[in-house]
Image (spheres, grey):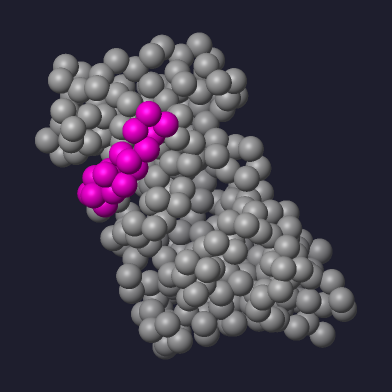
Amino acid sequence: MTTIRPAETDADLQAYVELWNTVTPDESSTVDQQRKRRQRDPRRLYVVAECEGAIVGCGYAGPSDSPDRGFLAPRVLPDARRQGIGTALLRELAAHLATLDFVSMSSHLDGADARSLAFALRHGFEEVDRQVEQVKVIGSEPVGVPPDGIAFTTLVERPELLRQSYNLAVEGYADMATYAPVTIALDDWLDGDGGDVPAGSFAALAGEDVVGFSGLCAMPDGVFEDGLTVVRSDWRRRGLAEALKRAKLAWAAENDISEIVTWTQRGNEGMRALNERLGYVYRSVSISVRAPLGD
């Protein structure tokens, strides 16, 4: 018999993280990260599925980046699948989102995992978007040169610029070619979403105004990932985004980083083309699915 319970103890949260990282290594996390996120937003639910004394599944449910939509993610070990555990996790997580008055729910799937997509479709989800992963192998990288009137600085030199760049980040997320509007909370931006590698995260300044930003994030498994790259609307089409990303790549080369990964949405051909010019290559696909809640 399988029991699903909240991952409230340190042992359960450790089991949750270990199973999550095993099933979804490209989205690995740490116990400390999940504990901080739960403390910051108590609406976040973490659960584990136990069968005969062993943790065989886990799941997460909580707010998404859209105010009326929740996000959930059931995960089951390969050897424990096709026994109803995934369905039980999904029901538990969806029930939690319903208590939070969300009107819909979404999830992300590995584009190479046809069984996961079939599972989602059987449970009333529909595909709404695809994101691609692009990877840049770091070699000899030229330094990014800012346009006239612009100066580059890092968050190490000016840490206060992370907070000052938040309004620009909101503008950038609003412009994303996503199936639903994307928002980001200030706390999330400051807690790492903006870039938790200060020396490799660059701001572009026109005087004292932040007109461009490109962050760098360090993932728990040692992978480095591009954070948001955004340019204020009146400074676009001047090569600023490319110069910011080149500055970041040059910093990575100087600091023995071997590769940087990034994700771009379907419809964001401009950023994909820029990444291609910079030497990024395509590696994997993530599928976004969505379903109504409360029907």
Residue range corresponding to the magenta coloring: 155-171
Name the foreground residue: 5 vs 78.
Answer: 5
**Horizontal placement of 281 versus 243: left or right?**
right
* Residue 86 versus residue 202 in the image, above or below: below
Q: Residue at x 40, y 50 (%)?
A: 190
Where in the figure is residue 216, as x and y percent of width and height? 45, 36
Question: Going by the picture, which residue comes out furthest to the right?
Answer: 52
Magenta stretch holds residue 166: yes
Quarter of the view holding residue 6: bottom right
Name the foreground residue: 45 vs 294.
Answer: 45
Name the foreground residue: 114 vs 23.
Answer: 23
Q: Residue at x 78, y 82 (%)?
A: 2
- Quarter of the image with the N terminus is bottom right
Quarter of the view holding residue 206: top left
Where in the figure is residue 27, as x and y percent of width and height? 59, 51
Q: Residue at x 48, y 76 (%)?
A: 43
- Quarter of the image with the C terminus is bottom left
**Horizontal placement of 56 versus 257: left or right?**
right
Where in the figure is residue 211, as x and y percent of width and height? 21, 35
